[in-house]
Structures are given as C-alpha cells and as structure tokens.
Amino acid sequence: MITCRAIARLLAYPDKDLQAHMHELKAAIASEDLVSHRLQKKLFAFMDGLANQDLIDAQEDYIELFDRGRGHSLYLFEHVHGDSRLRGQAMVDLRQQYMDHGLFPDDKELPDYLPLFLEYVSILPPLEGQDSVAEIVHILAAIGAKLKRKEGLYALAFEALTQLSTAKIDEDFVNKALREDEERDDSLEALDREWADTPAFDGLGDMADCGGCDQIDLTPPASLEPSTREGGRA
C-alpha cells in the first residue's frame, strides 16, 4: 500500500525534502483512493499547510507533539508495554518479522517506530497489509483521538491510517488512553524524573546482537524517501 509509505513519510521528522515533495505524497494517497474523499480533503489541506510552514516552526511543533511526553509517542509498544520487559521481546519479534520479509533495518531506529512499521506494511500484499494495520488500529485510533482533542492536525494522518483496515476499533482501549492522557504530567520536570528512573537497557534482551545484521538498501523512490529524525529517542 503506497498510502502507508506516504503517511510514513508524513509522520517522520519534517525537513526540506518533505516540504518539497508534499504534492507527490498527496498524489500517492489519492492514487490508491483508500482514504475517504472527505478525509482526503482535510488531510491534504494539512499537508499543504505543513509544506508552506516555516521549517523551524514545523520541527518545533513536531517535537512538542511526539517527543515531549509519551501520550503521542510514535513508538507503538510504548502504548501497550511501556518500559516492561515484554516490550523488549516484542521488539525482537518485530525485527525478526521484518527480516523474514527480506528487510534488514539498521540500528538507527527501534523496530516499533511507526513510520518504520508503515514502510514495512507498504511492501506487503494488500490483504496482508490490511491485517498488519488491523493489529495496531486501536493504538492508531488512541493516538489520533488524543491529538484531535488537543486540536493537533496530525490527528488526520492517524484517522487516515485507521481507514486502511476494516477492523473494529477497541473503543475501551481508546477511552482508557484518553483518561490516562488527562492524568499524565508531561511537564519538563516530570519527564526529567521519569527518564532518570528508567533503566537504560531494561528488557532489550538480544536486540544488541542485531547490530551485525546484513543490510539492504531500503531507499524508496526519491519522492517518498523516508527520513530518520534528528534528536529522536533511541
């Protein structure tokens, strides 16, 4: 699904290349027509605004939304496993899943980083891709709901992703996530305390052994080439 690849690029750290090729991302999404026309209109308006926004402002907005606090984290397992050891094993399993399909990601990003996962989905056969989106659709819906409540326009990208699968969204999961988000303290002081108390390598298990995995070129067509964020958590 080329739509997954386009949205993966949209959800990555904004840069000049993204802004320059935004029209091609829009064309890719429109070509598959998997997103409703009503939502496409809103999503494309957001994408046009992002393309014309001052880049520094766009990057600051992105960091504020996705890096300062866990409520909108783009790391999928953080929403279901947190920092438990279960997350480490889930990472190993997901990396193996990529490798089983001929993809050998490097160590620059954790396997559960959403844009990376969407890149993987984009190479799968359509039905298999839909099934993969269905496995995380409740997480996508929860992040989107939290962003929408805060009037964040990135919520439109998450709404579009939920339309790529016919799976029923777990409303209980979404509502629980919204309640937890209301109670969460995302002040800089609270974040400093939280990260200071988090073991640096808790539950990562054998992931360190993947550093020597063979590499392949995952570079997509230039117009849809994903970018690795600068300054993101590793």
Image (cartoon, rainbow, N blue to C red):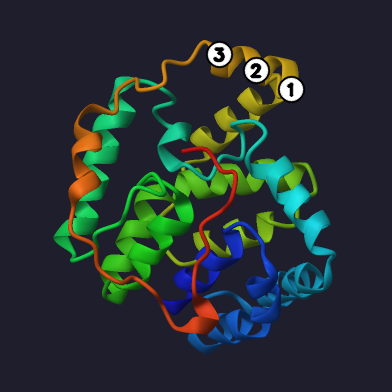
Q: Does label 3 or label 1 sit earlier along the sequence?
A: 1
Mark on residue 192? 2
Q: Which residue is mark 3?
A: 196
Residue 124 as seen in the image, left or right of residue 68: left
Quadrant in the picture for the N terminus? bottom left
Q: Nearer the viewer, residue 216 or 67?
A: 216
Could you say whether the residue bearing mark 1 is in a helix, strand or loop? helix
Residue at x 77% of width, y 49% of height: 61
Distance of label 2 from label 1 (alpha carbons): 6 Å
Q: Relative to 212, is 44 above or below?
A: below
Q: Relative to 227, is 143 above or below?
A: above
Q: Which residue is mark 1?
A: 188
State the image coordinates of residue 80 (x, y, percent, origin top left): 42, 31
Disc tally is 3
Residue 106 as seen in the image, left or right of residue 196: left
Q: Amino acid at mark 1?
A: Leu
Q: Amino acid at mark 3?
A: Ala
State the image coordinates of residue 45 (x, y, percent, origin top left): 78, 74
Say whether residue 169 is visible: no
Residue 187 as seen in the image, left or right of residue 8: right
Circle 2 crowding by C-alpha within 10 Å: few under 14, some 14–19, many from 20: few
